[in-house]
Amino acid sequence: MKPGYVYILSNKNRTTFYTGVTNDIERRIAEHKNGIGSVFTKKYNCHDLMYYEYFESIVDAIHREKVLKKWKRSWKLELIKTMNDNMDDLAFDWELPDVKNLYKS
């Protein structure tokens, strides 16, 4: 079984959160930062990685994503602050893959 990640993104003012799941966190964050693959994150400029969890199984990650999507905003804030008390972009200094040309036909 493939591993997976659940992650939470936010916009620069931290007013909107997006919860997602992926099997490749670096690629997926690069996609979000380049406006690829999610209408919601592009519309609301949610590009900053606030929180993530690793799972040995993508099935477990998908289950966790479904749970988190039902959470209240205040619960998500508390969860984020367990990993990221300053609400910084955790992927700010990651060397992300170049995904700009992945989806061009």
Image (spheres, rainbow, N blue to C red):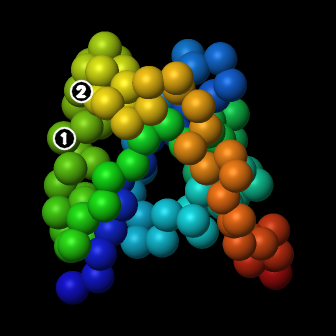
Residue 35, percent from left and from top: 73, 51
- The answer to whether residue 5 is left or right of residue 89 is left
Spatial CA distance of label 1 from label 2 is: 7 Å
Q: Nearer the viewer, residue 23 or 104?
A: 23
Q: Quadrant of the N terminus?
A: bottom left
Please, what is the three-letter code of the amino acid marked with disc 1?
Answer: Val
| Residue that mark 1 sits on | 67
94 left or right, relative to 79: right
User: Which structural element holds mark 2?
Assistant: loop
Residue at 19% across / 41% down in the picture?
A: 67
The amino acid type found where label 2 is placed reads Trp
Residue 85 in view? yes
For disc 2, the marked residue is: 71
- Asked if disc 1 and disc 2 are in contact, CB closer than 8 Å, the reply is yes
Q: Nearer the viewer, residue 32 or 49?
A: 49
Q: Tag 2: Cα neighbours inside 10 Å, few (<14), some, or many (≥20)?
A: few
